[in-house]
Amino acid sequence: MTSLIDVIFLLLLFFMLSSTFSRFAEVELTAAGGGNAVRDDVKPAFLRLGADTLDLNGRAVALDGLAPAFAGAHDKGGPLSVLVSLRREVTSQRLTDLLVALRRVEGLRITLLGAS
């Protein structure tokens, strides 16, 4: 009986130490497909993401400054298309941080172009 209790405590200790209690977040990605026509009067915004840099339409911007930069997008009506180009040195964590920052802005249609 004593050895059974020891085994139970060892199993309990093993499962408590091997499990994780952190919650993983998800970033929603959708594949490109057929959709509505793009309006001619609304030009897409161009983001170029580097390992330490972020350019919005050719101007350097901080990751925290993206929401104010897109604040006027709702005034033009309809969703704003954002093209995101990645430099070769961009990590997946840096891309995830950008997508989380862009998720806070409503009315954006994001298209990833890939590494350049």
Image (cartoon, rainbow, N blue to C red):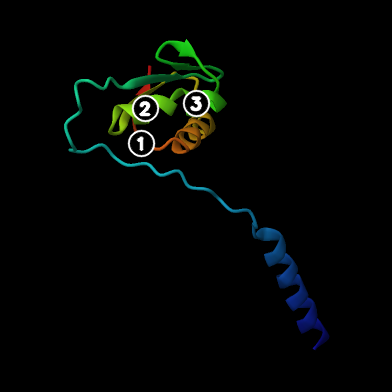
The residue at which mark 2 appears reads as 73
Q: Nearer the viewer, residue 72 or 81?
A: 72
Measured Cα–Cα span from mark 1 to mark 3? 14 Å
Q: Residue at x 30, y 27 (%)?
A: 76
Instruction: Return the x and y of residue 40 as percentages of the image width and height.
Output: 19, 21
Q: Nearer the viewer, residue 78 or 114?
A: 78
User: Mark 1 or mark 3, which has the lower sequence index?
Assistant: 3
Q: Nearer the viewer, residue 6 or 19?
A: 19
Is residue 73 shown left or right of residue 12?
left
User: Mark 3 or mark 2, which has the lower sequence index?
Assistant: 3
Q: Quadrant of the C terminus?
A: top left
Instruction: Return the x and y of residue 74 as percentages of the image width and height.
Output: 36, 31
Q: Secondary structure at mark 2?
A: helix
Measured Cα–Cα span from mark 1 to mark 2? 8 Å
The residue at which mark 3 appears reads as 68
> Residue farthest to the bottom?
1
Q: Amino acid at mark 1?
A: Gly
Which labelled disc corresponds to residue 107? 1
Vertical placement of residue 79 versus 26, above or below = above
Asked if labels 2 and 1 touch by Cβ distance under 8 angstroms, the answer is yes
Instruction: Return the x and y of residue 4 as percentages of the image width and height.
Output: 76, 83
Q: Amino acid at mark 2?
A: Ala
Measured Cα–Cα span from mark 3 to mark 2? 10 Å
Q: Residue at x 49, y 26 (%)?
A: 68
Q: Secondary structure at mark 1?
A: loop
Which labelled disc corresponds to residue 1? none
Vertical placement of residue 19 versus 34, above or below = below
Vertical placement of residue 47 versus 29, above or below = above
Q: Which image quadrant for residue 9?
A: bottom right
